[in-house]
Image (cartoon, grey):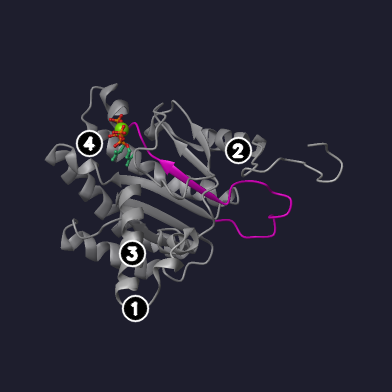
Amino acid sequence: MALGGTEVTDPGPRHIAIIMDGNGRWAARRGLSPSAGHKAGAERIRDLLSACRNRGVKVLTLFAFSSENWQRPPKEVALLMRLFHSYLRKEARRMCDEGVRLRVIGRRDRFSLRLQRAIAEAEEITCGGEQGDLVIAADYGGRWDIAQAARRLAEEVADGKRTVESIDEEAMEGQMQLADLPPVDLLIRSSGEQRISNFILWQAAYSEFFFTDILWPDFGEAALDEAIALFKQRDRRFGGRAGADDSAVPV
Ligand code: IPE
Ligand code: IPE
Ligand code: MG
C-alpha cells in the first residue's frame, strides 16, 4: 500500500495474506462469547491496514469467512454477517480517502441482498484507489476458486471461444481470484494453527508461511514486524538454486 520508489532496495512482501484466526479462543479466555472475539478481531483491521501501508505492502488479503464457516451456530454466523456489513459501511469512505481499493472475493450469492448491496457499494466507493488494495475473502474457499476457474474455461470451450488444448496453468491462473494482483509473498496465520483451511490453495504455491501463536485480536504491529523480518530472511528459490553461477559450479 505504500507508494513505490523502494522496490529495488526493499525486499519486503508486496502482498500479504492473513488467516485471521483465534477470535473464539481470545474471547473464551476472557469468559466471553465468540461474538466478543469477532468484534475485537474486526477492530484490528483498520490499524493493520495502515501498518501495512507504512511498510510498503501494496496488497493485504484477509480471510474473513470461509465457505466452511457457514457450519458455525446460526447466531454466530448472523453476528459475523452484521460485523461484515457494518465494517463495509463504516470503512469504505475512509479507505476511499486513503486511496485504498477494496475488493471482496468469494461466492456472494449466499449473502443477503442487503449485504451484497453493501459489498457492491463499498467496492464502487473505493474503486479509484491507487495507493493499495484490501481484499476481503468472504464465503471464500480455495477449492471453490479452482472449481470456478475450471468452470469458466469449460464454458469458453462450450461456447467455441477456446480449445481444450489451450487449457494450461496460465489459462487457469487467469481465471483465479487475485490473478491481476502481485503474487502472495507472505501468508500469515494467527492462533497457533498450522493449516491452510481451504484458503488460497492455488495462489499460495510459492508463498512464505508465518505461523504465530498470537490470537487474532492481539495481532498488532509487533507481530506484523516479526513476520516481515522473518520473510526478509527467507531464501526464496522457487525451485531453482540460489546464487548458482551456471558455469563455475560443478553439477
Ligand atoms: C476466526 O476466529 C474468525 C472466523 C473463522 C470467522 P475463530 O472463531 O475461528 O477463533 P477460534 O479458532 O475459535 O479461536
Ligand atoms: C479459517 O479459520 C477461516 C478464517 C479465519 C476466516 P477456521 O477457524 O474456520 O479454520 P479451522 O476450522 O480451524 O480449520
Ligand atoms: Mg478458528
The local secondary structure at tag 4 comes to: helix
Task: Sort mark 2 into few (<14), some (14-19) or many (20+) by Cα contacts within 10 Å.
Answer: many
Q: Which residues are magenta?
A: 1-22
- Give the alpha-carbon distance from disc 3 to disc 2, as whole Å: 32 Å
The local secondary structure at tag 1 comes to: loop
Task: First in sequence, mark 3 or 4: give its number.
Answer: 4
Image position, residue 232 (x, y; %) = 65, 39
- Give the alpha-carbon distance from disc 3 to disc 1, as whole Å: 36 Å
Task: Report if the CB atoms under discs 2 and 4 are less than 8 Å apart.
Answer: no
Residue drawn 57% across and 37% down? 225
Task: First in sequence, mark 1 or 2: give its number.
Answer: 1
Task: Sort mark 4 into few (<14), some (14-19) or many (20+) by Cα contacts within 10 Å.
Answer: some
Name the kind of residue labelled 4 in the image: Ser
Q: Which mark is residue 51?
A: none
In front of the other: label 1 or label 4? 1
Task: Sort mark 1 into few (<14), some (14-19) or many (20+) by Cα contacts within 10 Å.
Answer: few
Name the kind of residue labelled 1 in the image: Gly
Q: Which mark is residue 231?
A: 2
Label 1 beta carbon less than 8 Å to ligand 2: no
Q: Which residue has dot 3 on it?
A: 122
Image position, residue 142 (x, y; %) = 35, 48
- Give the alpha-carbon distance from disc 2 to disc 4, as whole Å: 32 Å
Of all residues shown, which one is farthest toward the left?
74
Q: Which mark is residue 160?
A: 1
Task: Report if the CB atoms under discs 1 and 2 are less than 8 Å apart.
Answer: no
Q: Principal SS element in the magenta part?
A: loop
Q: Which residue has dot 4 on it?
A: 35
Task: Report if the CB atoms under discs 3 and 1 are less than 8 Å apart.
Answer: no
Asked if the stretch drawn in magenta spans residue 120, the answer is no
Task: Report if the CB atoms under discs 3 and 2 are less than 8 Å apart.
Answer: no
